[in-house]
Image (cartoon, coloured by chain):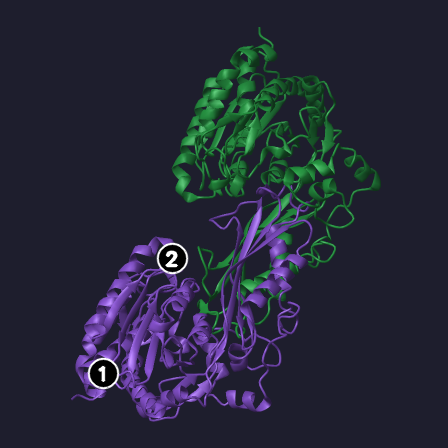
Chain colours: A green, B purple
Amino acid sequence: MQTIKEYVQSNQERFLEELFALLRFPSISADPKYKEDVVKTADFVAEKLKEAGADRVEVCPTAGNPIVYGEKIIDSSLPTVLVYGHYDVQPADPLELWDTPPFEPTVRDGKIYARGAADDKGQFYMHVKAFEYMMKNDALACNVKFMIEGEEEVGSANLGTFVKANVERLKNDVIVISDTSMISMEQPSLETGLRGLSYVEVEVTGPNRDLHSGVYGGAVANPATILAKLIASLHDENNHIAIPGFYDDVLELTAEEREALNQAPFDIEAYKADLGVGDVWGENGYTTIERTGIRPTLEVNGIWGGYIGEGAKTVLPSKAYAKISMRLVPNQDSHRITNLFKAHFEKIAPAYVKIEVKPHHGGEPVVTPTDSIAYKAAEKALEEAFNKKPIPTRGGGSIPIVALFEKELGVKTVLLGFGLDSDNLHSPNEKYGIENYLKGIETIPSFFKYFAELSK
Amino acid sequence: MQTIKEYVQSNQERFLEELFALLRFPSISADPKYKEDVVKTADFVAEKLKEAGADRVEVCPTAGNPIVYGEKIIDSSLPTVLVYGHYDVQPADPLELWDTPPFEPTVRDGKIYARGAADDKGQFYMHVKAFEYMMKNDALACNVKFMIEGEEEVGSANLGTFVKANVERLKNDVIVISDTSMISMEQPSLETGLRGLSYVEVEVTGPNRDLHSGVYGGAVANPATILAKLIASLHDENNHIAIPGFYDDVLELTAEEREALNQAPFDIEAYKADLGVGDVWGENGYTTIERTGIRPTLEVNGIWGGYIGEGAKTVLPSKAYAKISMRLVPNQDSHRITNLFKAHFEKIAPAYVKIEVKPHHGGEPVVTPTDSIAYKAAEKALEEAFNKKPIPTRGGGSIPIVALFEKELGVKTVLLGFGLDSDNLHSPNEKYGIENYLKGIETIPSFFKYFAELSK
C-alpha cells in the first residue's frame, strides 16, 4: 500500500488535469445565462465522485442549481464526515483585468490561475482525490458523505430545503469545509469562525424620468447625489456603522481573546504594499486582524446611476442604485440586521426621493470551538503535514449555509482551508497554489484518521 | 407671392417628412461607433441647404465631426444673420424607457417623438425651411449664413478652431440659435442668457485590484464609499456648492431683476406633479426659476463602480467613477471652476485612495442684452406670430460655443427657441410639437425682416 505522499507524487499530473477540466466550466451561478454550464459542472463532479469510489452518487435537482451527493459507508460504528463544497463560481468580470482567460486555467510560478481555482473548485476537489486515495489503499478511517452545491455564491437559496428534506441521509459527526484560507505555507492556521452576511440592493428614485441637467439641475433632487449622501452617512467619523442598533448583539471578545488573535503573524507594511494603498482604513480602536475577523462591516459592492458610457452626457438621472453587504459576527442575526438597515435607510431618505431596499440573501455567523474533537483532529493533521502547529484565526468571509447545517444536523464544522488571502477570490486573476492543492490532498486522510481515533 | 403662413400651410406635409428623414439618422456624437451615421447626417443637411437655395455649401472636415456651411449673400449693404445649429444628438439610452424607438420618429398627440426632435434637428431645420420660403418668394431681407455642427453634445471641441480659421467667411451682424425653449405656446418667451459648463470625470482608486469583501472588507478603504463621501461633501446643508471660491465671480442680480425674473408664470405644484417628485430640491434662498436660471449648479451625471450586474457579488471594488458637471452663470470662468473643482477634490481625498480628475469640456455663460436690436427684432417677430409679447427668461442650459462666437466674431446672439421644457431633452421620449415646428418656421422670416429694418 502506498502512503498518501507517494500517491500524490505519482498521480499529481492527473490530479491537475482533472482540476483543470473542472475549472474550464464557466459555472457562474449569479448569471442565468450560464445555467447550462452549471448543470454540466454538476454532472462532471458526480462522475468524478463515482470514479473515486463513492456510492449512491446523485445529481439532486432543486428549485435552482442541482446539488451533487455521494457517500461511502464502510462501517456504521465509525464516525461519519460530511464534506461540503460548491462547484459554482463568482462572475469573472471585469474580464479586461485578467492576465489570462478566467476559464482557461493557466499555471504561472506554481499557481493555477482561473476563476474558482481556490473558491471553491480547487479546494473541494482535494477531498475527492484524498477520498480516491483512501479507497484505493483501504485507508478510509471514517464513513464519508459529499454534498457539493451550485448556489453558494448566490446565497445557497435552495440548500436549506434540501438539508431539511435529507436530515437522515446527511446525518454525520462533523462537517468539513475547505473554502477558506490559512496564513501561509510556512504558518498553517485554522479558521475558528465565519462571519454572517446581510446583502441588500437599494434603489433611489428622484424624478420620474431622466432630465436635462441644464434645464432641471439645481432644482430637482439628483438621486445619485442623494444616494451618495445616504451611503456617506452609513459610517460615522470613527468608521463605526451608523445604523441604530447595529452593534447591539455583537459578541465582544475579552482582552485576552483579542491578545491571542493578534498573535498571528501580520505585516501591515507588506499588507499595504500588496494592495497598493497608502494607508489602511477601518473602525477606530481595532487592528486590521480584528476589523476583518471579529468586527461587523458594511461595504458597497456596487453603485450605478445616470450615464456611465463613453464621453459626456448632461443628464440628471431618474434612478441610482447600490448593492450593499454587511458582514456579521457571532450573536448578530442577519434578518434583524437586514430589517435594521431597511428601516434606517428608509428613515433617513429625504421627502424628495423614493427609496426601495431589496434584501438579496443572508447567513448567520458561526464559531468552531478549539476544544472540539474535530478541531483537534484538524490541528494534528495540519501539524503532521506542515511540521508546524496551526494558529487559530478568525476569517472574515461567510459561508451562510454553515449555521444552518449546524442547526439542522446538530454538529459542528471544521474549516480546513488551504487557500491564501492573496488568492484573489472574487477578483480578476483568482489563483490557487499547486503546492496548496497537493498539500491539501495530503492532509485530508490524516484528518480522517485522527478524527476516528479521537472519536473512540 | 405666398405669405409664410400660406407657404407653411401648403408645404407642411413635406416639411415633416424631411424632418423625419433627418431624425432617422442616429447621429450620436458621444459614441464613436455612430461616426458613419454622423457623417451621413452632415451630407443630408448640406443637400437640404443646397435644395433650399444656399450657395457655397460645404461639408467642412474637422479633427472630429464635419461642420456644414452654406450661405446666401444677396446684398453686401444688408445685415447678415448667422444661423448656428447642431445635427448631432445625445445618446438615446436608457433605450428601454422609450415608448417608441428613438430613431423612428413617431407622431402622438401632435408631438414628434424622436431623439433630436427638439435638440436640435427640429429647431435648426426650421431655419432651413424658412430660408427656402424666403428664397422662393423673394422675401430674404438679410444675407444669411448657416453653420450646422456635429459635436455640440460633446463640447464642440473642434468648432473653435473652425471659427478662428474662418472669421471672414463667418462675418455677420447677429447669430441666431434655435436650441432653447420658451414658456408655452400661449406665453412666448426669449432666453436672455445661457449658463456656462464645466464637465469633469473623477476616478477614485482604492486597492490595486477588486477584493473579496469578506476577506478585506472593513480593513481597506472602499473607493465607492469614499466617492460617496466626497460627492456628499460637495453640497453643504443649504445645498450651496461647498467648493472654496466657487461663487467668487457669480454676478448677483438686483432685487428688481430677481423680481422681474419671478414674474414668469410658474406653477410649482404642476412642476412637481410633472416630475413625480414629493418636493423640489435646491439652493436655499432661491426660487426654482432662480435655481435653474441665474444660479450655478453641480450635478452628478453618472456614477459607477463595483459589481452592477444581475444578482449579488461580494466584491470590494478597486475603482469607482463619477461624471460631474457644473452649470455656470455670468462672470464665472469654466477653466477657473474646473481647476477649483480639481484642486478641491484632490485636497479632500483621504490618504488611502488615489484621485484622478479628468476635465471633459466646458463653456462660458452668455447674456443677450434686452435693449439690443437683435433682441428687439426677435421680440417683434414673436409678438407678431403669437399675438403676445414674449417674456425675457434665463434658460438653465448651456451652448458652450456661443461665448466663443461672440468673442471671435464680435457680435451678440439671439436665442430664438421654440421648444418646451417638457420636451424631454437628453431623456427618453424626447419630443417636439408639430405646432412649435411650424410656428417657428413662420416666425423666422419676420425676425429677418425686423432685424433688417431696425438695423437701418
Residue type (three-letter) at the residue carrying disc 1: Met
Res A202 seen here: no
* Label 2: chain letter: B
* Direction from residue A348 to residue A306 in the image, left or right: left
Q: Tell me the residue that label 2 is attached to.
A: B63
Place residue A427 in its image quadrant: top right
Q: Which labelled disc corresponds to residue B134?
A: 1
* Label 1: chain letter: B
**Which quarter of the image is occupied by the C terminus of chain B?**
bottom left
The image shows residue A443, relative to residue B383, as above or below, that is above
Mark count = 2
Across and down, in percent, residue A271 comes to 69, 38
Could you tell me which secondary element the residue under label 2 belongs to? Answer: loop
Could you tell me which secondary element the residue under label 1 belongs to? Answer: helix
Q: Residues within 10 Å of mark 1 (few under 14, many from 20)?
A: many
Across and down, in percent, residue A105 comes to 48, 28
**Which quarter of the image is occupied by the N terminus of chain B?**
bottom left
Q: Earlier in the sequence, mark 2 or mark 1?
A: 2
From the viewer's side, name the closer residue of B299 and A114: B299
* Direction from residue A81 to residue A287 in the image, left or right: right
Place residue A266 in its image quadrant: top right
From the viewer's side, name the closer residue of A398 and A113: A113
Between the residue at mark 2 and the residue at mark 1, the CA separation in whole angstroms equals 34 Å
Q: Residues within 10 Å of mark 2 (few under 14, many from 20)?
A: few
Q: Kindly identify the residue that appears in the image at 57 percent across and 64 percent down.
A: B338
Point out the residue furthest to the top here.
A1
